[in-house]
Image (cartoon, helix red, strand yellow):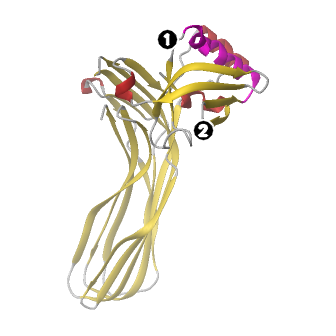
Amino acid sequence: VIAMERFANKLKSVNCAEDMMLEFINKAAFEYAQSMWNWVNQDVNNSFIMVTNYEGCADDMERLPFVVSDIRYDEEHNKAYLTADLHEWEDIAHSYDLNVGHIPLTPTHRMLMERGVMPRAADFTMSLASSYDRNLFSTTIGGWTTTVDAVVRTAGSLNVDFDVSVKWLKLKSAAMTINPENVAASIQLALTEKGTLKKEYNWQKTVISIPIEGISIAKIVKLGAFLDVDVGFTMDEWTGTATANFGARMQISNAATVKVDLVNSKNNRFSGWTPSFTPIPLTLSAKVEGSAQVYAEPNVKLEASALG
């Protein structure tokens, strides 16, 4: 089973309108692929599975399997035309090994990396860049009105290595290693108060879960990242009109790592994921009679599953 994302940076274009067409960025990358795949044409019974989510081939969030049974090469234009038929996973294999991540460092791979043909770091990278702006809360109690608006930003990426092994339709092993790269998040809240509040009011620990990015291989692997934000406030008696702006920034060290065994949780390893927080100072647009306590804490959460 070959995940196209493992060599996506060596592809100039992909087209699945009829047969699957792969155009490589240079002669060296084309010739390497040709040498690795040529065995398919040596026997009518030879085939392999190509997993892709390229536009026109499959949905961006779902990696689907194509059975490749023949390849025609256009050496002049560095193109490979694959006779590839789309199938359901359970229809094509009772036993398989799937890797989304590192390219094996065989002697041939090492030589090609030194020549610049294959990349040195070929991890699957999951981008966490996102933006999320919306009203979180609005209510009116008697003559008092309050609203909370949020501006949320996330940045960075996760380097993922995911291995799945299935034997006779049963999950034998499923493990992943994840390392962050410049992962950060920020939330800025605007709390607007107007009128008179005669008794204390609480709105605490409301969790906002924002999906950021994920990878899904149909019925095989699901891996997602979510930004969880805890926000809340406590208001004492209040009179006046004001807007308070406040928030927090979160950052995770690049040294953090998580190793997850989805079959045997005793093998799980987790370290360095405690985020560092920097508060965004509270600013108030007007003087009022009363007091308020507010907080905002963003945090990135990972979820993963195998075979459903």
Q: Give the range drawn in magenta.
A: 25-43
Q: Residue 45 — which label?
A: 1
Q: Which residue is drawn at 63% across and 35% down?
A: 14
Q: Quadrant of residue 207?
A: bottom left
Q: Residue at x 48, y 43 (%)?
A: 59
- The foreground one among 285 and 185 is 185
Q: Is residue 129 visible?
A: yes
Q: In this view, does 273 lie above or below 226?
A: above
In the picture of the structure, the residue carrying the numbered disc 2 is 17
Q: Specify the amino acid type for callout 1.
A: Asn
The image position of residue 137, as x and y in percent, is: 33, 73
In reply to whether residue 39 is colored magenta, the answer given is yes
Q: Which residue is drawn at 61% across and 8% down?
A: 107
Label 1 environment density (alpha carbons within 10 Å; few <14, some 14–19, many ≥20): few
Label 2 environment density (alpha carbons within 10 Å; few <14, some 14–19, many ≥20): few
For numbered disc 2, what is the local secondary structure?
loop
Left or right: 204 as drawn, with respect to 44:
left
Q: Specify the amino acid type for callout 2.
A: Ala
